[in-house]
Amino acid sequence: MYPESLSCRQVAAPVGTLAPAWTLWEVACQRYAIWRARRLDRAAFKSLLLLDDHLLEDLGCTREEIRWAAALPLSVNAALALEGRSRARRREAFLRRRSASR
């Protein structure tokens, strides 16, 4: 109904009410939810370390890449960083194989 950047309180609140305080509270709640979700994601990364190397290869990443992603600060989306790093590694390997076959 409302754009994601606006809440119904911001739109409906008349001037001079406590809307800015509620807005600040909503922002704090959203940031806490993001922080908590990233903490849970990091726990999931650590559970990936329990998998066999062959399964990790099937997923397209290495154990070292998972350790690297788990050590990133919480302000970074580790899943996206891991995806980018493993994609770059696979691309480099493909280009090496391609240049070696020529």
Image (tube, rainbow, N blue to C red):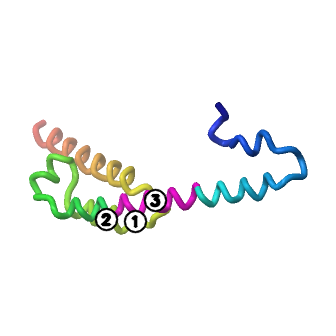
Q: Nearer the viewer, residue 96 or 81?
A: 81
> Disc 2, disc 1: CB below 8 Å?
yes
Q: Identify the element where label 3 is drawn.
A: loop
> Disc 1, disc 3: CB below 8 Å?
yes
**Residue furthest out toward the top:** 1
- Tell me residue 39's x, y (percent): 41, 63
Residue occupying image coordinates x 38% and y 54%: 81
Quarter placement of the C terminus: top left
Residue 68 - label? 2
Q: Nearer the viewer, residue 31 or 13?
A: 13
- Tell me residue 36's x, y (percent): 46, 61
Numbered range of the magenta stretch = 30-42
Left or right of 10? Residue 37 is left
Magenta-highlighted stretch: main secondary structure? helix
Q: Crowding at label 2, few (<14), some or many (≥20) Cα neighbours within 10 Å?
A: some
Q: Is residue 76 above or below residue 60?
A: below
Q: Is residue 52 magenta?
A: no
C-alpha separation, residue under disc 2 versus residue under disc 1: 7 Å
Q: Quadrant of the rendered structure where residue 4 is?
A: top right
**Residue furthest out toward the right:** 16
Q: Is residue 13 above or below residue 40?
A: above
Residue occupying image coordinates x 31% and y 65%: 68
C-alpha separation, residue under disc 1 versus residue under disc 3: 7 Å
* Residue where numbered disc 3 is placed: 76
Callout 1 amino acid: Leu
Q: Is residue 31 above or below residue 96?
A: below
Count of numbered labels shown in the rendering? 3
Q: Crowding at label 1, few (<14), some or many (≥20) Cα neighbours within 10 Å?
A: some
Residue 72 - label? 1
Callout 3 amino acid: Val
